Amino acid sequence: MLVSPSLLSADFGNLKRDIEMINGSEADMLHIDVMDGVFVPNISFGFPVMKYIQKVSKKPLDVHLMIVEPQKFVSEVRDCGAEIMNVHYETCVHLNRTVQQIKDAGMKAGVTLNPATPVCMLRDIVADLDLVLLMSVNPGFGGQKFIPGTLRKLEELRRLIKETGSGAVIEIDGGVNMETGRLLKDGGADILVAGNYIFSSPDPLAAIHGLKQL
Ligand code: DX5
Ligand code: ZN
């Protein structure tokens, strides 16, 4: 299983220490949650902080933009060293164009679905995507409870990817722990994001190891 720890649950007073902990862990990437207080009812951090994260992190950056009009910031996200740029389906009026812009900028393109957005909305774009991110909580906060309906969506997404010949991998974000992680593994998830489970653990390296072993 690929694991992408969410920095949202890190100790922002010790950001360098926490990023270095991830550097020394088995994590495959680092998940960066950007919130604007408009698309989601919370604000996290922006480009100056991401620039700093880029300087310290040795893991590929998996950037999850919970902002309106993400197409305005493709070059800024690229300049912060993002390997993957995830935009929400719900925020993109011209999703096909935005996906092409992300790829033209040299990044992998990911599209994220809120819990209430059906998988079928991706039918005509999924073949162009490198990644689909399914939200298993309503975006905006760490430490929420996993929404079980995500498992049915995961199954449907697997089917859609197969039918369309898409090369997209599936990432799941929200409420991931060992229990939900196992269900997601069985359902065919490729990447698990975990924030609270890792950072509230007395041994974050062991928590990452556990998820890797799923
Ligand atoms: C929620 C964020 C998540 C969040 C996950 O809006 O997109 O990445 O950090 O946190 P946990 O793993 O605590 O649910
Ligand atoms: Zn996220």
Image (cartoon, rainbow, N blue to C red):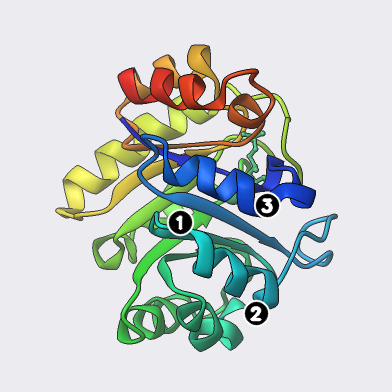
- Quadrant the C terminus occupies: top left
From this viewpoint, is residue 68 visible?
no
The amino acid beneath tag 3 is: Leu
Q: Where is residue 206 in the image (x, y as percent from the top left)?
A: 47, 19
Question: In screen coordinates, is 114 left or right of 165?
Answer: right
Q: Tell me what residue is drawn at x 40 percent, y 85 percent.
A: 101
Q: Tell me what residue is drawn at x 35 percent, y 44 percent.
A: 28
C-alpha separation, residue under disc 3 versus residue under disc 2: 28 Å
Provide the residue designation for mark 1.
121
Q: Tell me what residue is drawn at x 35 percent, y 82 percent.
A: 100
Provide the residue designation for mark 3.
15
The quarter of the picture where residue 190 lies is top left
Which of the two labelled residues, at mark 3 and mark 2, occupies the earlier sequence position? 3
The quarter of the picture where residue 106 lies is bottom left
Q: Position of residue 133 (x, y in %)?
A: 46, 49
Compared with 10, 56 (above or below) is: below
> Dot 3 lies on which element?
helix
The amino acid beneath tag 2 is: Glu
Q: Where is residue 17 in the image (x, y as percent from the top left)?
A: 62, 46
Crowding at mark 3 (Cα within 10 Å: few <14, some 14-19, many 20+): some
C-alpha separation, residue under disc 2 versus residue under disc 1: 19 Å
Q: Do the residues labelled 1 and 3 touch (CB within 8 Å)?
A: no
Q: Do the residues labelled 2 and 1 touch (CB within 8 Å)?
A: no
C-alpha separation, residue under disc 1 versus residue under disc 3: 37 Å
Find residue 69 and name its label.
2
Crowding at mark 2 (Cα within 10 Å: few <14, some 14-19, many 20+): some
